[in-house]
Amino acid sequence: MASQGLDETVTDSTDSVVRIDGVTKDFGSLRAVDDVTIPIEDGEFLTILGPSGAGKTTLLHMIAGFETPSDGEIYIDNEPVSDKPPNKRDIGLVFQSHALFPHMTVEENIAFPLKMRRENLENITEKVTDILELVRLPTDYVDKPVDDLSGGQQQRVAFARAIVYEPTLLLLDEPLSSLDKKLREEMRAELTRIHEETELTIVHVTHNQTEALSMADRIAVIRDGGLEQLAPVQELYAAPETPFVADFIGNTTLLYGTIIDRGEETSTVAIDDGTVRIPSGIGVDRSDVVIALRAEQVTLGPDSVNTVEGTLEQVSFEGDRTQYHVSVPAFGETIRLVTPNHGERIVHERGDTVTIGWDPEDAFVYPDE
Ligand SMILES: Nc1ncnc2c1ncn2[C@@H]1O[C@H](COP(=O)(O)OP(=O)(O)O)[C@@H](O)[C@H]1O
Ligand SMILES: [Mg+2]
């Protein structure tokens, strides 16, 4: 909605607790991070999302101080930090392997960063008790060796240890990826709660779009080291700016075509042996286009402006919804669609010929570059 105004305010460095400013990182001839600028606001939960190898961990390591940028600068509280070693940056960390001290107790693990900071013993006991409450571990767990805890409980200890000394910033690198699905969902909700209760600024890295969508305030999508789009979560989902973002987020089919006729309201795009309509005048000034179709925007039946016949390759009943893969010979593509279930029987099966469709304004259209 007010995205333009927001963009202007967040690029003002005085508003950001952390600012990644034109940062590049080269490993020899490999450019792992390419001129990335991300202002991070006080108290926000920012997720850096991208495929494996995109440069996410390298970015996080530069914020933490484990790597130095080849170019650009990182500011924390408006101070450049390139010359500051990791232990002077006041940052909490939780990585994929949570690296607790295995033979120490819960209390010894959590107290460790406080002892490093020479807190007095009384304060330490109080802070450990408070933080156990925050991460919802029983306080009589203090004397248990962390080895005796379950995976989920160890994860809670790792979060407690990372935030017990109230850092300016918490960095999370794929923190839930070693947990099984159910635990991962539970910890997602827990992280959201901990963020709300502490108002900590969190920078979180993941390749998992569901994790990003469910936890973040804003998402920065990175691809091959470069920033592809930075936006509040719902805006990113509703208005992906590039085919890469449209494809990476959501359940999306990409169709490649050429505009063959430009009309007043809609234009015609040829895709292989078929044609579809797209809205005219949406800033596409080239004739080669990419059309991104979200599965939930495609419907079964002949009632849309764009309709096409195909064969059901896959029907997957998933309780609250059904997913279909429809092979469309005219386009030489398989289109995905999903429909919500309200208790009715699924009448289609694999091999059936079906008509599917969507309206022009329900697809995203991009110039094909
Ligand atoms: N210390 C390093 N030396 C050389 N190449 C590295 C180093 N760290 C990362 N890379 C390379 O940089 C790219 C980005 O890696 P990384 O930041 O780990 O990606 P991600 O966390 O998004 O999976 C990859 O191609 C990786 O192989
Ligand atoms: Mg990584």
Image (tube, helix red, strand yellow):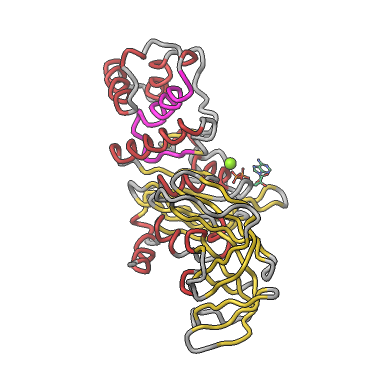
Q: Nearer the viewer, residue 295 or 134?
A: 295
Percent of width and height locating residue 226? 58, 57
Q: Quadrant of the N terminus?
A: bottom left
Instruction: Give, as a single range, the part of the protein colored magenta.
Output: 150-172
Q: Is residue 353 above or below residue 350?
A: below
Percent of width and height locating residue 25? 61, 51
Q: Nearer the viewer, residue 204 or 15?
A: 204
Q: Nearer the viewer, residue 20 or 325?
A: 325
- Give me the residue at 49% from left, 79% from top: 279
Residue 152 magenta: yes
Q: Nearer the viewer, residue 181 or 95?
A: 181
Percent of width and height locating residue 59? 54, 47
Residue 12 magenta: no
Please tell me in which quadrant of the rendered image residue 90 appears: top left
- Give me the residue at 59% from left, 61% from top: 253
- Give me the residue at 30% from left, 17% from top: 125
Q: Is residue 262 above or below residue 120?
A: below
Please tell me in which quadrant of the rendered image residue 92 appears: top left
